[in-house]
Amino acid sequence: MAAKVKTPGMVIFIAVLMFIAGGFSILGCVCGGGSIAMLEFVKFPQAQGQPDPMALPNHLKKEVPGYYPVIFTLMGLDGILGLAKIILGIGLLRLSSTARLVTMMAYLVNVLIICISGTYNGFFVLPVQGRFFAANPQPGQELAQMMAIPGMVLGVVLSLAVTITVLVVLN
């Protein structure tokens, strides 16, 4: 009988990281897509004197080029990559060399998608959103606007850090 090979601790760490990242990607895809669909198709009653809850989404849809196609494409790709990360995490636990190589490619594609998403949001969505909030001031918007770009940059930096960690450990 062949001796069982013990899975290295760092491989287990990367696999668990992939399970978590994959789960969050799928959750974000389902929740983000579901909330956009709900906002688009369900008509909410508007209380008298309250701002229209659909004003910003309608403005973005009208002013940002290809808003829904780009957002849904990026969400779909992220959801597919999330499922792939979970499957690849299982492959890593089985010490599959194919899973190791595909994992490295998946993380490189993930960084590319995050960079495309950040660029699209930074150059197209955030300026339109800023103009909307300047024309329609609402309580609490200053903090949200102030944190938008640093939040995007933090997301890219964290994604790069995780990708570098995965590439170093699996290489």
Image: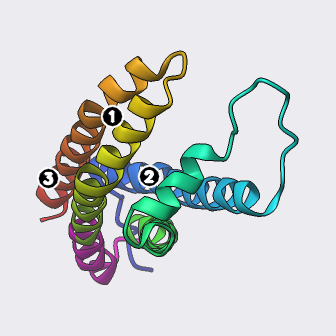
> Disc 2 versus disc 3: distance between alpha carbons?
15 Å
In this picture, residue 4 sits left or right of residue 149: right
The amino acid on which the numbered mark 3 sits, given as a three-letter code, is Ile
Which type of secondary structure does the marked residue at label 2 adopt? Answer: helix
Work out whether residue 150 or residue 23 is closer to the camera in this orientation and state it: 150
- Residue at the limit of the structure toward the bottom, as seen here: 98
Which type of secondary structure does the marked residue at label 3 adopt? Answer: helix
- Residue ID at (88%, 41%): 45
Q: Position of residue 162 (x, y in %)?
A: 24, 48
Q: Which residue is mark 2?
A: 21
Q: Can residue 121 be seen in the rendering of this structure?
A: yes
**The N terminus: image quadrant:** bottom left
| Disc 1 versus disc 3: nearer the observer | 1
Q: Which residues are magenta?
A: 94-108
Work out whether residue 67 or residue 100 is closer to the camera in this orientation and state it: 67
Q: Position of residue 140 (x, y in %)?
A: 50, 17
- Residue ID at (39%, 78%): 2
Q: Mark 2 packing: few (<14 Cα in 10 Å), some, or many (20+)?
A: some
Q: Which residue is mark 1?
A: 148
**The C terminus: image quadrant:** bottom left
- Residue ID at (23%, 47%): 156
> Disc 1 versus disc 3: distance between alpha carbons?
24 Å
- Residue ID at (49%, 63%): 62
Q: Which residue is mark 3?
A: 164
Main secondary structure along the magenta-highlighted residues = helix
Q: Position of residue 105 (x, y in %)?
A: 23, 75
Q: Position of residue 6 (x, y in %)?
A: 36, 59
Magenta stretch: residue 101 in it?
A: yes
| Disc 1 versus disc 2: nearer the observer | 1
Q: Measured along the vertical axis of the image, is residue 118 above or below residue 141?
A: below
Q: Quadrant of residue 51?
A: top right
Going from N to C along the chain, the mark reached first, 1 or 2, is 2
